Image: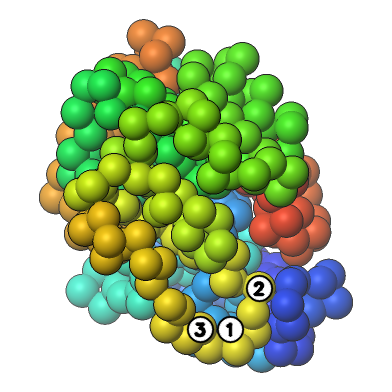
Amino acid sequence: MAGARKLVIARPFGAEPLPEDFCLQEEQELPPLRDGQILVEALYISLDPFEWAFKHLHKVGATMIGSQLARIVESRSAAFPAGRLVVGCFGWRDRTVADVGPRAHHPLWPPALLPRDLGGLPPSLALGALGMPGYAAYFGLLDVCDPQPGDVVVVSGAGGAVGSLAGQIARIHGCTAVGLVRSDEKVRWLTEELGFEHAFNYQTSDVGAALRRVAPGGVDVYYDTVGGDLSSAVADCMRQRGRIAVCGCVSTYRDPRPPKMLLIPPAVVRKRLRMDGFMFTQWRDRWPEADERMALWIRQGRLKWRETITDGFLNTPRAFAAMLRGDAIGKALVKV
């Protein structure tokens, strides 16, 4: 059987990934398939901030973690026939022999899933709006925060794959969407194309003053992907009994040390805010619901998406670092 290329961790990571932190290795020949296994060829590799957060999986010599959209080229599983597309946590590899039978296991989530028929929509959406980012946005906003018409919803990291969807879902449910992003280009994207009522570059704006200006009655819902000082500023602008969904803490991911419990903003106590963390996997039995509604909104033009695609497998480390810096708009992908 033909071989494969993989990008492995060459040395312990520092504050941010560097190209020399990874090295290319080649497997001259992959093993023959056993029952319950498939051979896949990667089409797109997904780049997600959580990959940097799971530091306990960053072992020198290990293939870098990550999910991908791949095509099944050979199968010994009736449930995963050759020719179908599959989403799997195969890591930064271009070809993979993967377990999909009873032995299949992955520490993050199900190792292989067949995406639904996208009905003519780009297949890469299985890694975006109709995949993990979409599920995190949909359930994290609607189930955790229960937004009501007229609510003011603030989304941090609103220029990314998850935050851009969460803000648009808030608008679909009759809320005012306010996005916090890291560049003026993303501010324009949110307000001019996605329909956010307000957006601010939190690196150059006084976030507290900006929120008090556009939401003088207070913020009802905060969908948080950033954490840190930014989230403290938002919490101070929230109404009594506001709701916070914690999807991620990107501001802490660059610290190579294990994260410590941070001080809770006094506003959480003073305003009796409810703060819930979540993982998209807890709604796995309801993923088809999200797929159906999100696909409908996309076809209706109510939900827009954008991809930042880097060509070439060997450019994955560079694209990953750019995504963590906030350079990517929408969903970051590598086209293998």
Q: Is residue 118 visible?
A: no
Query: Which residue bears the numbered disc 2?
Result: 254
Q: CA distance from mark 1 to mark 2?
A: 13 Å
Instruction: Name which residue lies at 57% across and 40% down.
Output: 209
Q: Quadrant of the N terminus?
A: bottom right
Which residue occupies the foreground of this view, 254 or 230?
230
Which residue occupies the foreground of this view, 308 or 69?
308
Horizontal side of residue 99 vs 321, given as left or right: left
Q: Residues within 10 Å of mark 3 (few under 14, many from 20)?
A: few
The numbered mark, 1 or 2, whose residue comes first in the sequence reads 1
Q: CA distance from mark 3 to mark 1?
A: 15 Å
The numbered mark, 2 or 3, whose residue comes first in the sequence reads 2
The numbered mark at residue 58 is 1
Which quarter of the figure has residue 265? bottom left
Look at the picture and state if 81 lies above or below 64: above
- The amino acid at mark 3 is Pro
